[in-house]
Image (tube, helix red, strand yellow):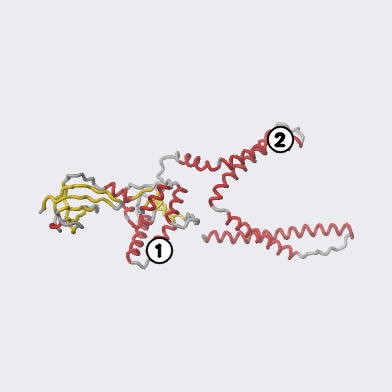
């Protein structure tokens, strides 16, 4: 729990205790006046002994006030976020119905100042009953559709850049900074606090490689905040505490803020799509930017290592695409001319199969 919330709760308990002591003094004074009046009627002006000292009422009032504050905390703990989101529109609708009925009755009776008290009560009660019933029906049966109405209104606000939720994998990957600097991503990048904690946990890992990745991710995030980036990096404290998995938390927040998710995680990509959340996958962007090659196209490549099959050589393009050269094993370390035979697109990336054409000098 946030420290500010704890401080507010402590002050609330103290305020309830103080208010309880004040009520105790007030009740004691009423009791004392009533007892004095009764004794005055029976015995004249004789002095009256207070059957209960003031301190008892004050202490008792403070205890009752503290108990009420704790009871309120227990009720708030039982009221989950999901239950609140369902009840709040219904309660608002019911209260509005009752208020509209009451003030409409008062407005009608304003035109009939000479009406009897009985007629006034009947008119106001009837209107409150009718509008209160309408409010109850609307609140309990139509409140679930308010969210879609709000969504439709928000969608017509204009062409404002959509918010993006950032996953840990994208921060560690590092390409997000270059993409943002190029202007292909705009708006606000929201980094939840639990993602930042996960990144910090990776940076504190005992494994050297994981620790290096985590620290690199923290450095990239810091540079995006301090640099002249075209996006705004915002750290948010929203954390669905009822959900334990980080991926599920991100999907829940994306639905709440109607934001997109920036990720490289294959599983998160699929789960978010199932939940109706739009995903921006940097790997998909990288694959889309790779140069297209067609069968029978000639190209040049440097053979780096041996392939799995006999006489195969392996090379790479500048973007990391693997080139399999049939017949290129004998030319390792050399630039060769090849002819494209086929292209294979996989989840891990793209592979281009070629045959050896000629050695280049």
| Mark 2, secondary structure of its residue | helix
Mark-to-mark CA distance, 2 and 1: 66 Å
Which residue is at the far front? 310
- Of residues 69 and 108, which is closer to you in this image? 69
Which residue is at the far top? 111
- Of residues 142 and 27, which is closer to you in this image? 142
Q: Residue at x 46, y 51 (%)?
A: 252
Measured from the top left, where is residue 235 in percent x and y?
Answer: 43, 55
Q: Residues within 10 Å of mark 2 (few under 14, many from 20)?
A: some
| Mark 1, secondary structure of its residue | helix
Q: Which residue is mark 1?
A: 201
Which quadrant is home to the C terminus? bottom left
- Of residues 224 and 332, which is closer to you in this image? 332
Q: Is residue 188 visible?
A: no
**Disc sitting over residue 294 in the figure:** none
Which residue is at the far right? 43
Q: Which residue is mark 2?
A: 123
Q: Residue at x 56, y 50 (%)?
A: 84
Q: Residue at x 33, y 66 (%)?
A: 208
Q: Which numbered disc flags the more N-terminal residue, 2 or 1? A: 2
Horizontal side, residue 253 vs residue 291: left or right:
right
Give the quarter of the image for residue 210: bottom left
Task: Decide: is 47 above or below 189.
Answer: below
Measured from the top left, where is residue 170 in percent x and y?
Answer: 35, 54
Measured from the top left, where is residue 55 in percent x and y?
Answer: 73, 65
Q: Residues within 10 Å of mark 1 (few under 14, many from 20)?
A: some
Q: Is residue 329 visible?
A: yes
Measured from the top left, where is residue 159 in percent x and y?
Answer: 41, 40
């Amino acid at each position: 729990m946030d420290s500010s919330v704890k401080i507010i709760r402590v002050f609330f308990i103290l305020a309830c205790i103080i208010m309880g002591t004040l009520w105790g003094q007030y009740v004691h004074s009423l009791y004392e006046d009533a007892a004095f009046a009764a004794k005055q009627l029976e015995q004249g002006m004789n002095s009256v002994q207070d059957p209960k000292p003031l301190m008892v009422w004050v202490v008792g009032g403070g205890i009752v006030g503290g108990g009420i504050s704790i009871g309120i905390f227990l009720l708030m703990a039982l009221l989950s976020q999901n239950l609140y989101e369902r009840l709040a529109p219904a309660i608002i609708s019911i209260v509005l119905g009752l208020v509209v009925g009451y003030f409409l009755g008062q407005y009608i009776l304003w035109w009939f100042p000479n009406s009897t008290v009985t007629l006034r009560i009947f008119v106001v009660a009837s209107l409150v009953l009718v509008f209160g019933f309408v409010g109850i029906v609307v609140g309990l049966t139509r409140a679930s559709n308010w969210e879609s109405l709000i969504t439709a209104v928000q969608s017509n606000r204009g062409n404002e850049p959509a918010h993006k939720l950032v996953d840990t994998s994208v921060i560690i990957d590092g390409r997000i900074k270059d993409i943002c600097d190029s202007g292909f991503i705009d708006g606000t990048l929201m980094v939840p606090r639990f993602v930042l904690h996960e990144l910090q946990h990776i940076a504190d890992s005992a494994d050297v490689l994981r620790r290096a990745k985590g620290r690199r991710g923290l450095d990239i995030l810091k540079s995006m905040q301090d640099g002249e980036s075209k996006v705004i990096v915002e750290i948010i404290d929203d954390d669905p505490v009822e959900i334990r998995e980080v991926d599920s938390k991100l999907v829940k927040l994306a639905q709440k803020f109607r934001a997109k998710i920036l990720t490289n995680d294959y599983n998160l990509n699929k789960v978010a799509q199932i939940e109706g959340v739009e995903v921006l996958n940097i790997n998909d962007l990288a694959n889309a930017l790779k140069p297209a090659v067609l069968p029978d196209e000639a190209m040049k490549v440097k053979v780096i290592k041996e392939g799995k099959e006999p006489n195969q050589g392996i090379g790479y393009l500048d973007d990391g695409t693997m080139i399999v050269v049939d017949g290129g094993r004998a030319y390792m370390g050399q630039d060769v001319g090849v002819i494209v035979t086929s292209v294979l697109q996989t989840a891990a990336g793209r592979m281009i199969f070629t045959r050896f054409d000629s050695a280049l000098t």
